[in-house]
Amino acid sequence: MGEDLFAAAAQARLQARSPLASRLRPGSLDEVVGQRKLLGPNGSLRRLVEADRLSSAILWGPPGTGKTTLARLAASASSKTFLQLSAVSATVKDVRAVIAEAQERLGAHGQGTILFLDEVHRFNKAQQDALLPAVESGVLTLIGATTENPFFEVNAPLRSRSTLFRLEPLDPEDLSILIRRGLFAERASASEDAVTHIASRASGDGRQALTTVEVAVALAGAETKDDDQDEVVHVKLRHAEAASDLKSLRYGRDEHYDITSAFIKSIRGSDPDAGVYWLARMLAAGEDARFIARRLVVLASEDVGMADPMSLLIANAAAHAVEFVGLPEARINLAQAVVHLAMAPKSNASYRALNEAMADVQELPAGEVPVHLRDAHYRGAASLGHGDGYVYPHDHPGGWVDQEYRPSELSDRRYYRPTDRGFEGLQGAREHKADGEGETEMKNSKP
């Protein structure tokens, strides 16, 4: 009895000294912050956990989004025994020992085993293959956690036997809820700008937010006078800044639009230094990297266009990097895209062409599709004359023929007028020559 009391007291002291994120680990699904798609009233993961029907699964998401917490909650709601291994330190021998233990438990007591494998992407092929028979037979229910894309880092056989659940970064509202819970647990309060700063600097990572709260409370508490020890510690913006080691940038709604405008106009104006500066301002203020990437993808077509067709590919690659790599590393990809777009020749000819065509669609009568362009593949189309007179360009030298592709009412309308800049300049020169003496030669060389 005395030993039990001693063990309980030791556990309580360890709990009191453990990090804030550990102390606030949710005890039920209702206490989990964020992940509404998975844990809402009709969330797939919630239904499976509550029904104790969760089979092997892979939890994929950024750090601090609740992967370990969800694994523990799934185990607590299950009749199975919960075991945990870290792929960083575990070996094939450790895996086989767990499997042997699970087989013995199932045979002797009829009880299944949940194995939580953190950082599952760190397991090599041999280690992952060692798990396959036990997972396939049901001896083990595997819950793997990874920050990496499992389609690249987890063997296909193991992945195919697991349900994939993708966890999203916590949004500012969720982080604010978590921060206030942390403050309450620390018997502290905080100003709104301090809470906002901590949430904006956490990059969707709940663990990082709570760690910052813990440090900020300690810094604020150190300023409390000896005779004010009973007073609630109040965290101010300077404490939050010091805890995150970053200066807070005021970034209101108006500034969001103003800085975004300056960012776009700097790139459009071919100033890479200004573009990178405004990118840095946006990132430092906690702007959503996906928003920045979307603006670059639009700009690549709106302001660069056919003057440098590769720009759209580079902007799209940067947007993919934001999703695949994530911050902070993806800021490097964004910077490369900004510099490329700023240095690229500029043209809005394709954008203007679309606007003029849209205006004609709205304002002019809609002409009929020319008979020679109509679909001639279905039965009866030939009897209607569909396709009559159509000339197949690939049957001619250069892959081009002089043929009308618009309704006759619009045959004289021109929308795309290439500039003389970059790749588009080459196309423009070709079109210009095609209007003159070398018409046949140049038109036959069109791509």
Image (cartoon, rainbow, N blue to C red):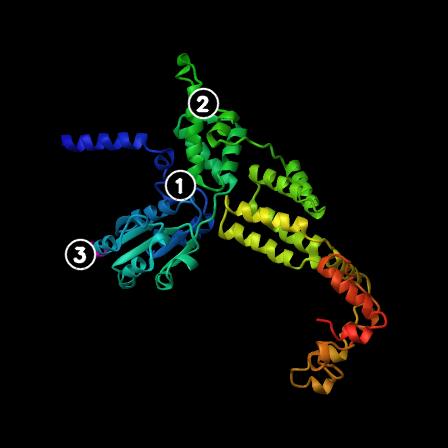
Instruction: Confirm whether residue 105 shows in the render.
Output: yes
Q: Are marks 3 and 1 in contact (CB under 8 Å)?
A: no
Tell me the chief SS of the magenta region: helix
Which circle marks residue 391 in the picture? none
Label 1: element kind = helix
Instruction: Confirm whether residue 135 shows in the render.
Output: no
332 drawn magenta: no
Q: Nearer the viewer, mark 3 or mark 1?
A: 3
Residues packed near mark 2 inside 10 Å, few (<14), some (14 to 19) or many (20 plus): some
Is tag 3's residue or tag 2's residue first in the polypeptide sequence? 3
Residue furthest top as drawn:
227
Question: Residue beneath label 1, please?
Answer: 31
Label 3: element kind = helix
Which residue occupies 51% across, 39% down?
173
Q: Amino acid at mark 1?
A: Glu
Question: Residue beneath label 3, please?
Answer: 104
Which residue occupies 31% across, 30% down?
16
Q: Name the residue nearer the viewer: 394 or 373.
A: 394
Q: Nearer the viewer, mark 2 or mark 1?
A: 2
Span of residues in magenta: 99-110
Q: Amino acid at mark 2?
A: Ala
Q: Amino acid at mark 3?
A: Glu
Q: Is residue 334 above or below residue 156?
A: above
Label 2: element kind = helix
Is tag 3's residue or tag 1's residue first in the polypeptide sequence? 1
Task: For marks 3 and 2, give the CA distance.
Answer: 53 Å
- Quadrant where the C terminus is found in the figure: bottom right
109 drawn magenta: yes
